[in-house]
């Protein structure tokens, strides 16, 4: 069984850095853990985007039409744009190494954005930067 995220792990995720340790503990308890094998796609371009994925361990590559556009590692997250804009995924993400991901579904992300202004500000800034 994959190891669940800890509040300490989430302290290194920019999205959650503004949260108090007890709030990070709550977020950690909400997260499902997903394991992805090296070389497998985490998400594919055009998929329905209803999950925010946080890389806890490993590295991934963001691809647009098979062209690499970014490399992600521990503390990075993706999927926020589709949740905020109710859109389909605009890029694919492939595991460069085995991945351990923390997963939040859309309603959980929206609840966190409502309750924690720092989370909302981080997601809004990320969406603006990636658009």
Image: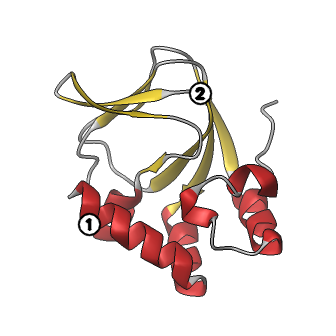
| Pointer 1 residue | 128
Q: How many marks?
A: 2
| Quarter of the C terminus within the rendering | bottom left
Tell me where residue 34 sits by quadrant.
top right
Give me the residue at 63% from left, 73% from top. Answer: 18
Secondary structure at numbered mark 1:
helix
Residue 22: image x %, image y %? Answer: 83, 73
- Tell me: 28 left or right of 115: right
The CA span between labels 2 and 1 is: 26 Å
- Tell me: 21 left or right of 94: right
| Pointer 2 residue | 58
- Tell me: 90 left or right of 24: left
Name of the residue lying farthest toward the top: 39
Residue 93: image x %, image y %? Answer: 37, 32
Examine the rendered structure and indicate whether residue 66 appears above or below residue 13.
Answer: above
- Tell me: 70 left or right of 31: left
Q: Is residue 86 visible?
A: no
Tell me where residue 74 sits by quadrant.
top right
Q: Relative to the observer, which residue lies in front, 87 or 75?
A: 75
Q: How is the image coloured?
A: secondary structure
Examine the rendered structure and indicate whether residue 25 appears above or below residue 46.
Answer: below
Examine the rendered structure and indicate whether residue 27 appears above or below residue 119.
Answer: above
Secondary structure at numbered mark 2:
loop
Identify the disc placed on residue 110: none
Examine the rendered structure and indicate whether residue 22 appears above or below residue 127.
Answer: below
Give me the residue at 51% from left, 46% from top. Answer: 76
């Amino acid at each position: 069984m994959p190891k669940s995220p800890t509040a300490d792990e989430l302290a290194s995720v920019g999205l959650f850095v503004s949260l108090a340790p007890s709030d990070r503990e709550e977020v950690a308890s909400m997260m499902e853990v997903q394991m992805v094998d090296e070389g497998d796609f985490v998400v594919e371009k055009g998929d329905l985007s209803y999950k925010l994925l946080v890389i806890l361990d490993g590295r991934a590559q963001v691809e647009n039409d098979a062209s690499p556009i970014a490399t992600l590692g521990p503390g990075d997250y993706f999927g926020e744009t589709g949740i905020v804009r109710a859109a389909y995924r605009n890029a694919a993400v492939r595991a460069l190494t085995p991945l351990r991901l923390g997963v939040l579904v859309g309603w959980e992300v929206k609840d966190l954005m409502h309750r924690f202004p720092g989370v909302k500000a981080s997601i809004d800034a990320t969406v603006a930067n990636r658009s």
